[in-house]
Amino acid sequence: WVGVLVMAAMGFLDDFIKVRRSHNRGIFWKQKSYVTLGFSLLLSWWLIAATGVSETISFTRATLPGWNVPWPVFVIFAGLIVWSTSNAVNVTDGLDGLAGGSAMMGFFAFAIIAYWAFRNPEVYGAIVNPLDLAVFAAALGGACAGFLWFNAAPARIFMGDVGALGIGTALALLALTTDTQLLLILICGINVIEAGRSMWTLASLNDTCHLSRKS
């Protein structure tokens, strides 16, 4: 919850500046990217230092494939997951209902995973407090479902950075705490595609601007 609230507060600050200045730019995007990366690394370090989460790179459980890495490497790996997922959800938040709908499915998937781990501790024993994680994921999934009632086209309520960064952080932290870091790519497939499309568009625009200046 601390991780979600910290990143959501960052998004709220960005949204507040946009509204206050009546401008579509809040915190300059490069500064926000660096700050969110710093918060992501700090939250990942705290998660590993304060809990007994598995420090292995995994797909569906701690032992599959269960790649063991030094804890500083895992902190960086986890921080990059939090940073990239939160920004991927932020990029996805453009079309009415897209970010909320994809996040809802992701949260319900993690609720099933965590509850399944709770029911089968002999297989998924490395997960810390799986039932709490299932409740956390189900609560956020239900919140997204309620949000979609007002966010479906034509949207009356928008998510903004406060929602996108908070939701993306929650999805990333659920992947880390349920030992499904690599599975996150499939669970958040829409966000991965949207982030890739956005990077491709930016790269194409930069190339076009570079060629225009040369001309």
Image (cartoon, grey):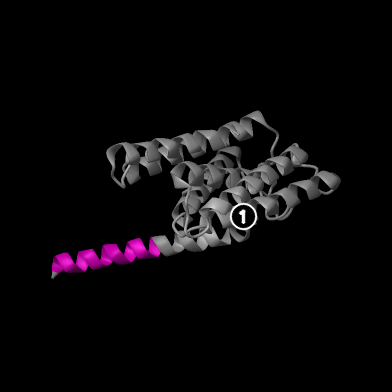
Where's residue 95, x and y in %?
46, 60
Q: Is residue 200 magenta?
A: yes
Where's residue 98, x and y in %?
52, 59
Magenta stretch secondary structure, dominant: helix
Question: 199 or 79, which is in the foreground?
Answer: 199
Q: Which residue is mark 1?
A: 184
Whether residue 99 is visible: yes
Question: 151 or 31, which is in the foreground?
Answer: 151
Q: Amino acid at mark 1?
A: Leu
User: Left of 134 or right of it: where is 175?
Assistant: left
Where's residue 178, x and y in %?
70, 46
Magenta-highlighted residues: 199-214
Whether residue 62 is visible: no
Classify 85 as above or below 126.
below
Q: How many marks?
A: 1
In the rendered view of the protein, which quadrant contains the C terminus?
bottom left
Secondary structure type for disc 1: helix
Question: 193 or 97, which is in the foreground?
Answer: 97
Q: Is residue 197 magenta?
A: no
User: Left of 146 or right of it: where is 113?
Assistant: right
